[in-house]
Amino acid sequence: MNARFENFTTSILKIYKLIQKIKLREMESFGLRAIHVMCVSYLEENRDGLTAGELVRLTLEDKAAISRALGTLRDDGYIEYITRSYNSKARLTDKGVDLARRIDERMSLAVDDVGEGFSQNDTETMYRLLGKITERLESYYDRLQAD
């Protein structure tokens, strides 16, 4: 097998799994799970609310997982639905805004800790390269789908 491929995929997978573990650990004190981090974060960015489908596209999670996450957030008083219709938008309550602020503080600490020792240039280069890798992988996948 191609060592470059193995190194790349193993590194990306390990990063993903560690991020999930960190999110899970950080959410334990709130009685929530890792998936709630991104839901709350995106709802904070979109104060007019988001539908479950929009959260699915943004988080890359499956619809059932997002539906369960939204149910938990609603039951715990962190979100409310704007209307009671199918495909209604969810938005943060005041309690949810406070949760989002606390999550953001924890995420900032984690990002700062992980970025310790990296220059601004290193950080900008990393994000630029990750963006390019994502674009190239999407393009490659689209070509595979077309065949």
Image (spheres, rainbow, N blue to C red):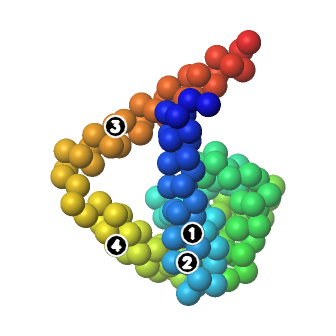
* Residues at discs 3 and 4 in contact (Cβ within 8 Å): no
Which quadrant of the structure image shows residue 142? top right
Q: Mark 1 points at which residue?
A: 21
Q: How many labels does the image show?
A: 4
Q: What element carries label 1?
A: helix
Q: Where is residue 102 in the image (x, y as percent from the top left)?
A: 43, 79
Which quadrant of the structure image shows residue 95? bottom right
Q: Mark 4 points at which residue?
A: 109
Which amino acid lies under the numbered mark 4 shown in the image of this protein?
A: Leu
The answer to whether 16 appears left or right of 103 in the picture is right
Q: Which of marks 1 and 3 is nearer the N terminus?
A: 1
Q: Name the residue under label 2.
A: 25
Q: Where is residue 105 in the image (x, y as percent from the top left)?
A: 37, 75
Q: What element carries label 4?
A: helix
Report how far apart the C-alphas of labels 1 and 2 lie in the structure: 6 Å
Q: Name the residue under label 3.
A: 128
Which amino acid lies under the numbered mark 3 shown in the image of this protein?
A: Arg
Indicate whether 117 appears above or below 143. below
Q: Where is residue 134 in the image (x, y as percent from the top left)?
A: 49, 34
Q: Can residue 46 be seen from the camera position used here?
A: no
Between disc 4 and disc 1, the foreground one is 1
Query: Of residues 31 and 43, which is closer to you in this image?
Result: 31
Which amino acid lies under the numbered mark 1 shown in the image of this protein?
A: Lys
Q: Where is residue 43 in the image (x, y as percent from the top left)?
A: 54, 62
